[in-house]
Amino acid sequence: MNDAVIEIHGLVKTFRDFWLRPLASALRGVDLTVGRGDVFGLLGPNGSGKSTTIKLILGLLRPTAGEVRLFGLSPRSRRARARLGYLPELSYLHPFLTARETVLYYAGLSGLDRRTSRERAAELLSRMGLEGSADRAVGGFSKGMARKVAFAAALVSHPELLVLDEPTSGLDPLATRDVKELIRTLAAGGMTVLVTSHQLFDMQDVCTRVSILSQGKVVGEGAVADIVAASADPRHALEDYFAAAVGAKEGNPA
Ligand SMILES: Nc1ncnc2c1ncn2[C@@H]1O[C@H](COP(=O)(O)OP(=O)(O)O)[C@@H](O)[C@H]1O
Ligand SMILES: [Mg+2]
């Protein structure tokens, strides 16, 4: 695969305390490749290292060892970062700003001019079904609505790569369905998506490829179509694959 959007080799991240004593081995040698057009699921239980991987991809953390390339560039380069949109695990929306002001704020951060910003904010808010609430303060929004505002903010720069950390966590089933539908629509339009989740059944019908993380290591990797085809129970294919991958690792002390 030459057209890799994200390439990770031998990634290690050890968090240290104030005295530089090792606190936690969050990543212990991770390799992964996200190709153009993939909807890539980084799946694993809480604490397996998903958010740490994302922060290293975004250049928000420095690796202890190993390498991350984003569009073939360093993740700390402005040129690489300008090409991605990021939905954090917890989006800190300012409660007193309206939905429109929030999206305009992020448009400003990504350097868009006022006119383009206003056009894109209106277009994205209506695409999210928020046109009727665009001028209300987001502090009064439901979780699902707030997540859509955060999505609009992440998309305002028209990124080639969208990085979503637990986009469905804490959402009710209808809001979860909306988020999945949105990911599918964006992917159909050619966007590359990296999405993390600990809720496997949410992701089976959205992702094209998955990597399973457990305790900072990749314990399974493959195309979802292959995983489903090889499964005895296709509806629960990803859950069964996950259980086998995590179980195999735990039963096999490294
Ligand atoms: N800033 C930090 N300082 C110390 N330990 C951390 C820090 N961030 C994450 N960790 C630890 O790294 C491991 C992986 O965390 P994380 O990447 O957040 O997992 P996930 O997103 O899969 O739930 C956990 O053991 C967590 O406690
Ligand atoms: Mg996380």
Image (spheres, grey):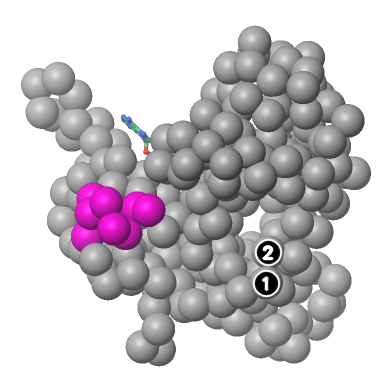
At 40% from the left edge and 89% from the top edge, which residue is drawn?
1
For residue 62, above or below residue 66 = above
At 32% from the left edge and 59% from the top edge, which residue is drawn?
80
For residue 199, above or below residue 68 = above
Q: Could you say which disc has been placed on residue 15 in the image?
A: none
Which residue appears farthest toward the left when viewing the image? Answer: 19
Q: Is residue 114 left or right of residue 5?
A: right
Using the image as rendered, state which of residue 61 and residue 200 is in the foreground.
61
Residues shaded magenta: 74-82
At 64% from the left edge and 63% from the top edge, which residue is drawn?
243
- Residue 248 in magenta stretch: no
- Residue 79 in magenta stretch: yes
Where does residue 44 sit, x and y in percent of width and height? 55, 53
Where does residue 102 sit, x and y in percent of width and height? 60, 27
Where does residue 106 sit, x and y in percent of width and height? 51, 35
Where disc 1 sits, the SS reads loop
Identity, as a three-letter code, of the amino acid under mark 2: Leu
How many residues crowd mark 1 within 10 Å: few (<14), some (14–19), many (20+)? few
Q: Which residue is mark 1?
A: 189
Q: Is residue 240 left or right of residue 31?
A: right
Residue 82 visible in the current orientation: yes
Identity, as a three-letter code, of the amino acid under mark 1: Gly
Where disc 2 sits, the SS reads helix
Q: Which residue is mark 2?
A: 186
Where does residue 89 sit, x and y in percent of width and height? 55, 37
Residue 31 visible in the current orientation: no
Asked if ligand 2 lies within 8 A of label 2, the reply is no
Q: Quadrant of the C terminus?
A: bottom left
